[in-house]
Image (tube, coloured by chain):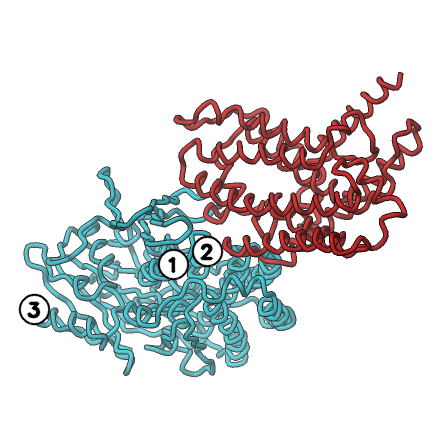
Chain colours: A cyan, B red
């Protein structure tokens, strides 16, 4: 999957924007590599990825967001982090950068409307984010999220770092997706250096990615039910998640499998008795999980909460290129493992579940189906695990590369430019949440205030991965 | 001598409910935890939490009025008095002539009114949300509760709890449809009044879904301790009320003898344990309902209680 890269002038840039706005292409990301601004585009029909690069004059470039709303927040982030201005942009408020000036929330007008401010400090132990609701009694009129509270300057810290140091930063962008970030960064680095990881490493990466997906989906299914105060599912799913994490600790020496997928391969093999342990885990999950699915499906009080709550319209999912369960529950049948696809998934059999209802229930069901697919994938990977080396040596040279990996919540996009000495000159990380947070704001429309936590948990967007 | 003994017994009742209330809360939590395969906090944890809160400083919102500061004491006092009037282990206590069921509902209603005011007082959005939801629930739960009282009072011929309990314990009561309907209605009202699942979740950390917890979100220190203790007392009150009306076995009659009193106390603790266990099982097996389903839920209680009253009018044997 080598992307085509084109340097364009204003005309070419605007043409790309028009094709985005017309729905012919999907925006993968928009970022700055000063003095250039780059856009990664996905053609969903062919799976081709292209990068369009525009050389800014006087720190300015034509706005993408004015015609294609998914780019608005990315443009605001570029302005905050790199001081490049999108000309013609409709929204020029800061995004990741928090200043002393009061933040202007979008207005909502009408009789008897009042605002409810929630966060960034919440009553539970979750990540910080501010939500501003405008409501009429219990009915929501508008929701606007204010993020950026966990901005740690990851991209800036990676610039100038050696490759292995930068890989550690990438793995810490969002802790629950650390394997996916590690693999995406490794793929980008390997493309930049023109090398390939050995087959065994590629299969071990996929094994870790599926274990990570399993653990997170178990956690999510339980947490969504818990937000409807059905704590039985939460407790039972918590047990499955814990078993998965312990299995990961047994084979890979780390519960979250952090820092194991690195540029050039993986740093450690699975423990000698790994396959046998994994077999016990799979057997246990296959025994317990169907009962939990039945419990979920047969508990009327729970179904009453999840069905028709928080609907994401398929048009929005397509326009925003929403990945993961958010997109697939709203009819967008895109999975980065298939489109554009990466090894070893071309050799493995699995299905990409798709639903069209777009409600909380559909997002739960996508997770349930994906758990079943991941279980089958783990078995296939174990059966087909090739022998051989774990890691190749990295040459010291410059280059550019990108990696797109399906994390549990959607596609993680990493773009990397290496300096001639092999250190990182510029790295851009884009979490799936960038295109899911705005959809959450549309999903709560017409819902009641008390149902927001349920909608929010069914999205389970990353704060850290978004704020970087 | 008899007067002193009466005072002592009424005092014992007041102390008993006060001391048992956190234990019941702890017991329900423990059972729920065990049902979820968790170890759960120790049974005595609610007492420790109360002591901890009592020792802590109070943080007051800068724009909170004097009302905000006195309401915890009001709510606690009203709930404690109400809980002391229910015959638990012995009927015909010193204050039992005041233990009119309608009076108890009125005392609890005042406590709720003040708590809703406190939610609004600090001027935060969560307090407002909590108070508005609480009042919405109350406006349906209180008529249902009154209707339940009428249904049972018509059968027992009194709204006086000691008399009602004595009647329910006698052979006259028989098997009556209207009593069954009233029991179901009373359970629904008790669940709603005590902010339990499926109406509210006492263990939630989600500000936007809270009802009772949102209302008292601004409270801290000894104020919060009093409100938590009042919530525990209220749960004990409703459990005791159900036990007193529908399972009055073992309640000692107004004689002063050690053995019946001991039997009464043992029976009371046994009833609390059984009902607490059932509550935990019920809460574990159901999800919380949408806020706007609560009126339908409480409407069912109102209808059942109304039906019970009407049936009683149709025929004396119902």
Say whether marks 1 and 3 touch (CB < 8 Å).
no
Is A63 situated left or right of A123 in this image?
left
Residue B58's place in the image compared with A131, above or below, is above
Q: Residue at point 75% right, 52% down?
A: B312
A332 over A465 or under it: above or below = below
Labels 1 & 2 near each other (Cβ < 8 A):
yes
Residue bearing mark 2: A451
Q: Residues within 10 Å of mark 3 (few under 14, many from 20)?
A: some
Between circles 3 and 2, the one closer to the viewer is: 2
Q: Is residue B292 left or right of residue B53?
A: left
Q: CA distance from mark 1 to mark 3?
A: 40 Å
- Give the distance between the C-alpha atoms of the residues marked 1 and 2, in whole angstroms: 8 Å
Q: Tell whether A106 sits left or right of A178.
A: left
- Front residue of B249 and A19: B249
Chain for mark 3? Answer: A
Name the residue that disc number 3 marks.
A9
* Residue position for label 1: A444
Q: Earlier in the sequence, mark 3 or mark 2?
A: 3
The residue lying toward the viewer, choosing from A2 and A113, is A113
Image quadrant assignment for residue A341: bottom left
User: Which residue is painted at 56% across and 63% down in the image?
Assistant: A244
**Vertical order, B95 against A53 (above or below):** above
The residue depicted at 83 percent of the width and 22 percent of the height is: B6
Location of the N terminus of chain B by quadrant is top right
Single out the residue that lies furthest toward the front.
Answer: B314
User: Quick one: label 1 or label 3, which is nearer the N terminus?
Assistant: 3
């Amino acid at each position: 999957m080598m992307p085509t890269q084109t340097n364009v002038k204003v005309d070419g840039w605007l043409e790309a924007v028009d094709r985005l706005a017309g729905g012919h292409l999907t925006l993968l990301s928009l970022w700055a590599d000063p003095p250039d601004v780059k856009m990664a585009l996905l053609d969903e029909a062919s799976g081709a990825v292209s990068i369009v690069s525009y050389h800014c004059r006087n720190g300015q470039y034509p706005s993408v967001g004015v015609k294609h709303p998914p780019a608005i927040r990315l443009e605001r982030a570029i302005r905050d982090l790199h001081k490049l201005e999108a000309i013609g942009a409709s929204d020029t408020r800061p995004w990741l950068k928090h200043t002393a000036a009061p933040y202007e929330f979008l207005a909502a007008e009408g009789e008897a409307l009042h605002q409810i401010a929630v966060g960034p400090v919440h009553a539970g132990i979750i990540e910080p984010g501010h939500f501003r609701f405008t409501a009429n009694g219990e009915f929501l009129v508008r929701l606007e999220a204010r993020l950026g509270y966990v901005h740690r300057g990851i991209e800036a810290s990676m610039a100038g770092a050696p490759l292995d140091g930068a890989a550690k930063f990438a793995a810490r962008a969002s802790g629950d997706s650390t394997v996916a970030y590690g693999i995406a960064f490794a793929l980008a680095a390997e493309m930049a250096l023109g090398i390939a990881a050995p087959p065994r490493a590629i299969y071990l990466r996929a094994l870790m990615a599926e274990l990570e997906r399993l653990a997170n989906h178990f956690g999510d299914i339980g947490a969504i039910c818990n937000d409807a105060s059905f704590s039985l599912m939460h407790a039972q799913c918590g047990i499955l998640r814990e078993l998965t994490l312990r299995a990961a600790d047994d084979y890979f020496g780390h519960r979250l499998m952090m820092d194991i997928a690195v540029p050039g391969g993986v740093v450690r093999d699975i423990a000698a008795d790994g396959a046998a342990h994994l077999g016990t885990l799979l057997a246990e999950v296959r025994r317990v999980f169907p009962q939990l699915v039945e419990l979920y499906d047969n508990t009327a009080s729970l179904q009453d909460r999840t069905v028709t709550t928080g609907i994401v319209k398929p048009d929005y999912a397509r326009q925003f290129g929403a990945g993961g369960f958010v997109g697939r529950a709203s009819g967008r049948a895109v999975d980065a493992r298939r489109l554009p696809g990466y090894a070893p998934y071309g050799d493995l059999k699995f299905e990409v579940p798709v639903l069209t209802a777009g409600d909380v229930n559909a997002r739960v069901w996508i997770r349930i189906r994906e758990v079943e697919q991941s279980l089958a994938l783990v078995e296939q990977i174990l059966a087909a695990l090739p022998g051989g080396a774990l890691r190749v040596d990295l040459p010291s040279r410059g280059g550019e590369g990108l990696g797109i990996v399906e994390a549990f919540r959607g596609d993680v996009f990493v773009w990397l430019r290496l300096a001639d000495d092999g250190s990182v000159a510029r790295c851009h990380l884009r979490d799936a949440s960038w295109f899911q947070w705005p959809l959450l704001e549309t999903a709560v429309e017409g819902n009641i205030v008390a149902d927001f936590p349920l909608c929010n948990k069914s999205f389970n967007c990353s704060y850290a991965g978004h704020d970087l | 001598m008899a007067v002193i003994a009466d005072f002592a017994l009424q005092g014992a009742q007041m102390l008993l409910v006060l001391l048992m209330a956190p234990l019941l809360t702890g017991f329900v939590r423990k059972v729920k935890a065990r049902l979820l395969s968790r170890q759960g906090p120790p049974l005595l944890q609610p007492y420790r939490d109360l002591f901890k809160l009592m020792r802590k400083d109070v943080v007051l919102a800068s724009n909170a009025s004097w009302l905000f500061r006195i309401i915890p004491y009001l709510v606690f006092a009203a709930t404690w008095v109400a809980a002391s009037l229910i015959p638990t282990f012995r009927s015909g206590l010193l204050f039992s002539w005041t233990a009119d069921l309608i009076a108890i509902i009125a005392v609890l209603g005042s406590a709720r009114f003040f708590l809703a005011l406190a939610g609004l007082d600090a001027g935060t959005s969560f307090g407002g949300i909590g108070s508005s939801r609480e009042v919405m629930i109350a406006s349906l739960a209180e008529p249902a509760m009154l209707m339940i009282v009428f249904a049972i009072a018509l059968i027992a011929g009194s709204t006086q709890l000691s008399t009602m309990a004595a009647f329910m314990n006698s052979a006259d009561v028989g098997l009556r449809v209207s009593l069954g309907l009233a029991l179901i209605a009373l359970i629904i009202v008790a669940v709603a009044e005590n902010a339990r699942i499926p109406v509210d979740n006492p263990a939630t950390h989600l500000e936007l879904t809270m009802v009772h917890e949102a209302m008292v979100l601004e409270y801290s220190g000894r104020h919060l301790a009093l409100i938590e203790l009042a919530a525990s007392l209220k749960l004990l009150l409703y459990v005791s009320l159900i036990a007193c009306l529908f399972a009055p076995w073992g309640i000692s009659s107004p004689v002063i003898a050690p053995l019946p009193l001991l039997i009464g106390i043992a029976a009371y603790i046994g009833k609390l344990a059984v009902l607490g266990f059932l509550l935990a099982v019920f809460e574990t097996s159901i999800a919380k309902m949408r806020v706007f389903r609560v009126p339908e839920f409480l409407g069912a209680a109102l209808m059942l209680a109304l039906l019970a009253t009407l049936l009683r009018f149709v025929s004396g044997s119902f």
